[in-house]
Amino acid sequence: MKKFFANLNTEKKLAGAVFILGVIAIFAGNPYGGAFIKVNEKELALSTVNNSEKISVNDLADWIIKAKADFELIDLRSAEKYNEYAIPNSQCIPLVQLPEADLLRNQKIIFYSDDDVAASQAWFILKSKGYKGVYILDGGLNAWKEKVLFPKAPINGSKDELAQFEKMKEVSKYFGGQAQTDSSVTELTPSFKLPAASTGTQKLGTAPVKRKKREGC
Amino acid sequence: MTSLTKILTHAFEKHEGHVHIKTEAKPYSNPYLVGIGLGLVLLAAFVIMGRGLGASGAISTLVAAGVDKVAPSHAAGNEFYKEYIGDGTTNPLKDWLVFEVIGVLVGGFLSGTLAGRVKKGIEKGPRISSRKRLFYAFIGGGLMGWGAKLARGCTSGQALSGGALLNLGSWAFMMMVFAGGYAAAYFIRRQWI
Amino acid sequence: MNSPFFKFNYFGMDVSLILAFAIGIGFGFALERGGFGSAKILAAQFYFTNMRVLKVMFTAIVTAMLGVYFLSVFGFMDLSLIYIGNTYILPQVVGGLVLGIGFVVGGYCPGTSVVSVSTGKIDGLVYLAGVAAGIFVFGEMFPLIKNFYSSTDMGSLTLPQFFNMSYGFIVFLVVIMALGAFAAAEWGEKKMAAKKSEANS
């Protein structure tokens, strides 16, 4: 019988502790504050200087043609500009909506805007939230138009440069652009919105991953 | 508390089949301490993975994978199986729950061996035959499997994990499980007491 | 360090599978310790002779709930990243009833049946086969009951959201309810034991 009471005391003690925790809970506040993330400024500053997180437009064009699906391409401009023209397989999330966007952390995220500014802002926002795989399209849409859609023939270029230009001619055709072989400035707008080879501006995240991310029982 | 547990374990031992192991089975641990341990494991799952535990999901994956092996076109046409098989890029068996359930098997064996409780046998009450017990076990399992899919979880996933996260559906589910159990208990009492 | 670790990319999919195995070991170990590998103990819950199921379950829920709550309040854990399934109230209520009946008839739930198999119980194995059969039947029937299955989707709802009270207050209420249930269970068990010893004497 003594043992019984001794045991009961431990249980009563546990019950008391749990009760106190419960009472504290009434006043402890909202648990949805989100995790406190320490932003390591040095680390952030270093990564921009290293250019390790910038992606060139040529590389991106290459990946799209090769149908690589391991990244999310985000267009940060407004919806109207997005509908006018956007890089294939990109998703439109205007910069103002970015904090609310629920982007997956375990994939590469590439931002682009007309130039580098909005992309850098987005990069910083996600970095401060602790995302790891965030990248900027170097030069933005302007560089894309200049180098991929409407590559200019190099004047008096070396053999390598000319070979590179021939390749870019094909690439630009793929994306609906046109190589510029003369030096006159033509109207730099793409001939049609979506090149035939792309699968349209659907969310890249949903296309290859048909298996639902099941976390239930 | 310990004396009560001793009485019950002793009662069960009388009905158990042949004793292979010499060491006497130790009485079960204090349920509250076990509960804390279980709660900490669950908390670890939340902290590490951001998800709770589960069991029926693993079996569903196995069933779906089995159907896929035997009749792939039928599996592909069925929405339910498709969800578990995915699009073929990864092996459906590379599933978190499948690995977790294999761990459960190992963990249960470890604890059972440490306590001398690993014995081949059939758990049943005194007034029922082994054959009938196995029959009921199969039917009960069938009901459970069916109900678990409808409710999107079993007691491990829905009740425990969802309950700790204060999920409304999980609490409703938990209440109904107890209700159903108590309601049916009277009719099945022959099997247990 | 922030949790949930996986959601913050501290490791990838393959490591998570190894962790699943490790967590599973802990899960199975705890279940067996509690006697949940035995159908008789599990079923005894429903005859008021042994209330272990209730005690272990609610203690586990309260422990994990308090852990999640306080970790989140202190900013260590991001609660919004933890998966909470949608509430489909009607199918979950019906499923729960069916599951409860299956629990008493079969004597296990899927998790505990795996534990019972690990300690050599044949009825556990048969039970698991039954579960697989039940799931198979469900899968085959799926086109017919699909609408019911997806009905009454209330979205991802928590108790605080539903009752429009603060999260902390609901935590308190759950603690009170659990403590009350434990007291009732202890009282019930004592009475049953007294009845038993009366009958035996």
Image (cartoon, rainbow, N blue to C red):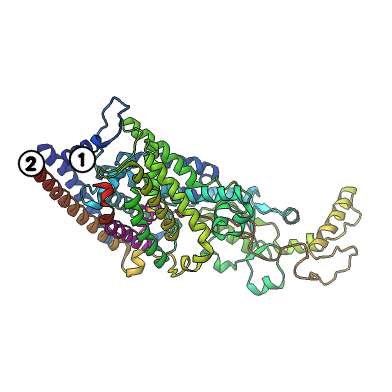
Residue C201 is labelled as: 2
Query: Neighbour class for label 1 at 10 Å: few (<14), some, many (≥20)?
Result: some
On the rendered structure, is C80 left or right of C170? Answer: right
**Residue at 58% from the left image edge and 52% from the top image edge:** B85
Subunit under mark 2: C
Check if mark 1 and mark 2 are on a common chain. no
| Residue positioned most to the bottom | A80
**Residue at 55% from the left image edge and 68% from the top image edge:** A97
Give the image location of residue C130, x and y in percent. 43, 49
Give the image location of residue A168, x and y in percent. 83, 56
Is residue C73 visible in the rendered structure shown here? no
Subunit under mark 1: B
Magenta stretch, residue numbers: B155-184
Q: Nearer the viewer, residue B180 or A61?
A: B180
Give the image location of residue C115, x and y in percent. 38, 41
Residue B8 is labelled as: 1
Q: Nearer the viewer, residue C94 or A56?
A: C94
| Residue B100 drawn above or below residue A157 | above
| Residue positioned most to the top | B22
Secondary structure category for the residue under label 2: loop
Residue A182 lies in the magenta stretch:
no
Residue B159 lies in the magenta stretch:
yes
Residue C171 is labelled as: none
Q: Are marks 1 and 2 in contact (CB under 8 Å)?
A: no
Disc 1 versus disc 2: nearer the observer = 2
Q: Nearer the viewer, residue A118 or C83?
A: C83
Looking at the picture, which amino acid does disc 2 mark?
Ser
The quadrant of the picture occupied by the N terminus of chain A is: top left
Label count reads 2
On the rendered structure, is A70 left or right of A57? Answer: left
